[in-house]
Amino acid sequence: MPTLVVVRHAKSDWSEARLDEQRPLAERGRRDAPAIGAWLATHVERIDLVVCSPARRARQTWQLAGAALDPQPPVRYDERVYEAGPTELLTVLAELPAEIRTVVLVGHNPGLSDLVTQLIGEPHELKTSSVAVLTWPGSWVDAEFATATLAAHTTARG
């Protein structure tokens, strides 16, 4: 059974005019991101791969969160995750090899909330620093057609 761990990036900094993709984490985000990692270390047995948006705030979130994990899983930065909706995110998941059983997907709203809502069949809003753990029978390709179970969720705060 695949396990998808959806992580919305921590709070970003809006204090300066920057391209959206270049916005860093705010002070609160830098405090909250390690709490994501601590939660994952306690609640997710093993992570095979991290698929992360290349946006600065997503990369910084994972760098701070991933520091709590031992061993640290491999990370793949995928342009398609930035500004992606559920259809694009499902395509990214469908391309994952079958031997990868647990994936962390680090990205943005509204796409992540929409993905979780679609997979579990009921509204689910992910605030900044939120984590949702989903499982379903079958494979990564089956995500689009299966009804997932929301196995755990939290909004990590440091």
Image: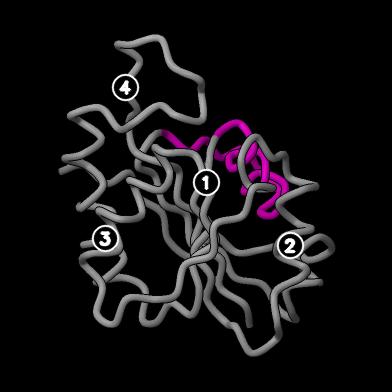
Residue that mark 4 sits on = 13
Q: Write the residue at 52% across / 46% down.
A: 54
- Local crowd at mark 3 within 10 Å, few (<14), some, or many (≥20)? many
Q: What type is the residue that disc 2 sits on?
A: Thr
- The answer to which image quadrant residue 144 occupies is bottom right
Q: Are marks 1 and 2 in contact (CB under 8 Å)?
A: no
Q: Nearer the viewer, mark 1 or mark 4?
A: 1
Residue 140: x percent and y percent?
73, 73
**Image: 1 above or below 90:** below
Q: Are marks 4 and 3 in contact (CB under 8 Å)?
A: no
Farthest residue toward the bottom? Answer: 99
Q: What type is the residue that disc 3 sits on?
A: Gly
Query: Which mark, by number, is residue 147?
Result: 2
Q: What type is the residue that disc 1 sits on?
A: Pro
Q: Nearer the viewer, mark 1 or mark 3?
A: 1
Q: Which residues are magenta?
A: 109-127
The residues bearing labels 1 and 4 have C-alpha atoms spaced at a distance of 16 Å
